[in-house]
Amino acid sequence: MRPPLSETIFVRLRDGILGGRPAAGEPLASERVLAEELGCNRHAVREAVKRLQQAGLVAVSHGGATRVLDWRATGGLDLLAQLPFTAGEAPDPALLRSILELRLCVGVDAARRCAERAPAAIVAALHAALAAQRDARPARAPLLYAQLWNHVIDGADNIAYRLAYNSLLAGLDPDSDLSRALFSAEAGDVDAARALVTAVTARDPDNAAAAAADLLSCALAETETTTLALADRSSTAPRFASAREQHR
């Protein structure tokens, strides 16, 4: 099912702003100009600009110019899913590092809280996920490892951690080349995962946090190597001739 035309326009405008085109403080082209440039109707442009406003990327002034904001000062966690992949480029090592460092902070404390709070059903789910990860083929291990962490986050019983975790990983499909490259070492470290599950089962917050730190540090160590390897394979996204053509 094709996305709405306004979604296609929003993605193009969003990627341009995140890439500094136009820069913070500069005006966004008018609805009429954008509609002409993109080959679409003004209603679709209006809907896309409304979404840019909701994302904290532009400030709409009725009767005046719509100006681009500094997304670093006004954006939310939801932008993290977009930043490493702006305009089809290879992931930026600094951006991935930022995401993975926050993932480390959230994951370590979530593991601690999980050891303190997880109900029996979550503990059982962790053991099942660990067994599946242990017996999985290498290609399936990252998917099952991601499931183990979903249980840890659920067991922490902290909605802020759940939403932050969702945002942190929204742009990292566990079955993608990037995720496999980043998380294969973690997913293959069944002993460290077992230590985490054992600590949660024993209601041992300190050891659960330590095991989580051991696991979640692996991807950080892989960031630069991974992005360099993927950069060799990436190609710049094709020029967007018109929104309507892209939408077809």
Image (cartoon, helix red, strand yellow):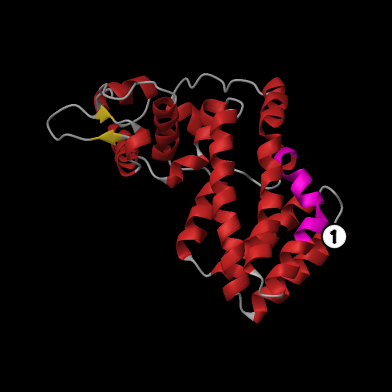
Q: Is residue 111 magenta?
A: no
> Which of the 4 image quarters holds residue 208?
bottom right
Give the farthest residue toward the left. 63
Residue 55 location, x and y as percent? 35, 42
Q: Is residue 192 magenta?
A: yes
> Which of the 4 image quarters holds residue 171?
top right
- 150 lies above or below 31: below
Tell me if I can see residue 105 in this picture: yes
Residue 136 location, x and y as percent? 85, 57
Foreground residue among 213 and 47: 213
Mark 1: which secondary structure? helix
Report the label total: 1
For the point 36% across and 34% down, the residue is 71
Please give the range of residues in magenta.
181-193
> Which of the 4 image quarters holds residue 117?
bottom right
- 69 lies above or below 187: above
Left or right: where 46 falls relative to 111: left
Left or right: where 178 falls relative to 71: right
Q: Amino acid at mark 1?
A: Arg
Left or right: where 72 falls relative to 100: left
For the point 56% across and 20% down, the residue is 238
- 111 lies above or below 230: below
Give the farthest residue toward the bottom. 120
Give the farthest residue toward the front. 206
The dominant secondary structure in magenta is: helix
Q: Residues within 10 Å of mark 1 (few under 14, many from 20)?
A: many
Residue 198 location, x and y as percent? 75, 69
For the point 65% across and 39% down, the residue is 220
Foreground residue among 229 and 214: 214
Residue 128 location, x and y as percent? 77, 70
Residue position marked by numbered label 1 in the rendering? 134
Tell me if I can see residue 154 in this picture: no
